[in-house]
Image (cartoon, helix red, strand yellow):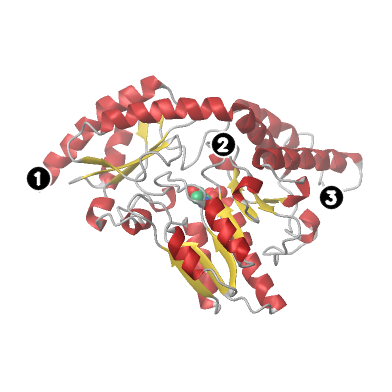
Amino acid sequence: MTYLDHNATTPIRPEVLDAMLPWLRDGYGNPNSVYSLGQKARAAVERARESVASLIGAADQSEIIFTSGGTESDVFAISGAAWQARAEKNGRGTVLATRIEHDAVRGQLSELRHRGFDIGEAPCSPDGVVAVDALRASIDERTIVVSVMHANNETGVLQPVAEIAALARARGALMHTDAVQSLGKVAVDVKALGVDMLSLSGHKLNAPKGVGALYVRRGVRLSPVLTGHQEKERRGGTENVASIAALGVACELALRELKSSAAHALVLRRRLEAGVLKISDARLNGHPERRLPNTSNFVFSGVDGHHLVVALDLEGFCVSSGPACSSGASLASHVLTAMGIDPGLAAGSLRISVGWGTTEADIDRFLKCLPVAIGRLRSVASVA
Ligand code: PLP
């Protein structure tokens, strides 16, 4: 099996698994217990907090709140800011985001719309870059929070977060970014980005599923989504010690290897794209350069994305058509249609995302199988 779907999830690295296991065996103490078994677990959680803080350049480790993953972090940032503003009756009632956000954000936007908040979603250019001018015109003194993802999960296009954060700050609004896809692939620094909140997820970073974190800049107040005493009253629930320890080690590895892994991914991506674009009627979606080094998104006219994924699976390749949560249905991706791609064509999209463990030989084998699979699907489609 050749795994080329690292934006959906990633394999757990052996070092990360090793860091996790002691807390599932003998180190089962509750980190909130005062005796030493608990305090050892507490120390592991706090070490991991430091590692997450250093990867994203946070000023202080207390700015990291552990969560159950990217979805919870997004929901916490956006709805925590919205409900806090309502509680403070500060005259702000608008939440702004973009049309290309992940469903974790989009779902929360529709929830807040039903609860009486005003919601705005900025468009993007045909190459998938969010329109800064549209946000410049919308952010005002009523804006609570602006949420713009750092890198898009489908196209890998990197967004002008720092520029938008400056606009938000100038009008007293909070800035949130979903950096679930960019962390470990490109440098992410909360100070350089100028964000107040940043979401991250373990399983996109060679750590387990079901763990993540939200960076919250010191001084920013959010209404808790999960109430309780843990995480300094900001997020209730006994900490997932084993997964948090694993996330810490994954962040240390990501920081140490960032340059080399990004360079390797870029070599693979270029090799892949050069090969795929030789196929007739193949097109690359998203900005040609302003992209994560590991992500390529293509459309092939006359080919259904879901059928292509199944055909490639039979050849031993794991790839995806659209975001993982909606794969299984050949729906046109909201990201590609926001970029102006025809819904019929967008339903044939194929996302390849390389990562830890991917080799040039993997890409070469894929490039041999892909044209054959596409040719077969096109000939079936032409007969039907
Ligand atoms: N945000 C983005 C951009 C993602 O790609 C994902 C997962 O696909 C999420 C949020 C959700 O993260 P999690 O699966 O950890 O809830």
Quarter-wise, where is residue 19 in the image? Answer: top right
Q: CA distance from mark 2 to mark 3?
A: 30 Å
Residue 229, how many percent across, how many down?
A: 80, 60
Image disc number at residue 382? 1
Q: Residue at x 28, y 52 (%)?
A: 346
Q: Secondary structure at mark 1?
A: helix
Image disc number at residue 32? 3
Q: Which residue is mark 2?
A: 184
Q: Residue at x 82, y 46 (%)?
A: 31
Q: Amino acid at mark 3?
A: Asn
What quarter of the picture does the N terminus occupy? top left
Residue 298 vs residue 21, the one in the foreground: 298
378 left or right, relative to 361: left
- Badge 2 crowding class, 10 Å Cα cut-off, few under 14, some 14 to 19, many 20 or more, is many
Q: Secondary structure at mark 3?
A: loop
Work out whether residue 16 can be spotted. Answer: yes
